Image (spheres, rainbow, N blue to C red):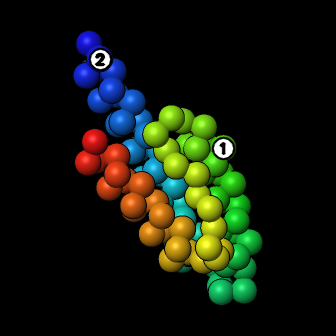
Amino acid sequence: MKSKKKFCFRYHLERKIFQHLLELKRHQIRAGQHNEAILVKRAIDAYHQSCASTVGAGRYIPEDFTFKSFEKFLYESLRKLQKK
């Protein structure tokens, strides 16, 4: 029973992270470099509200507010989840 519950938990967390990646890519395509920092900051805030409160999802501590660095963090979070 625990393994089924753990599987469902991981599935939902992975799904949330994929949704954030999709949204980030959508913003990246539409936005220019001038708005990048603002859009990434908003994406980080949305991630913290939806995922970081979930146990197992790490908080993003920004090095810089670029699409590339936040995207890298999201992919690393997925890899960590899939290794467990």
Amino acid identity at mark 1: Gln
Of labels 1 and 2, earlier in sequence is 2
Residue 35 in the image: above or below residue 61: below
Looking at the image, residue 30 sits to the left or right of residue 1; the answer is: right
Whole-percent x, y for residue 59 in the image? 58, 52
The quadrant the C terminus occupies is: top left
Q: Where does label 1 land, which residue?
A: 49
| SS for callout 2 | helix
Whole-percent x, y for residue 44 in the image? 64, 59
Residue at image point 46% right, 39% down:
56
Front position among marks 1 and 2: 2
Q: Is residue 26 visible?
A: no
| SS for callout 1 | helix
Is disc 1 in contact with disc 2, using a CB cutoff of under 8 Å?
no
Q: Where does label 2 land, which residue?
A: 2
Looking at the image, residue 2 sits to the left or right of residue 20; the answer is: left
Q: Is residue 73 visible?
A: yes
Structural crowding at the residue carrying mark 1, measured as other residues with C-alpha within 10 Å and reported as few (<14), some (14–19) or many (≥20): few
Residue at image point 66% right, 44% down:
49
Structural crowding at the residue carrying mark 2, measured as other residues with C-alpha within 10 Å and reported as few (<14), some (14–19) or many (≥20): few
Q: Quadrant of residue 64?
A: bottom right
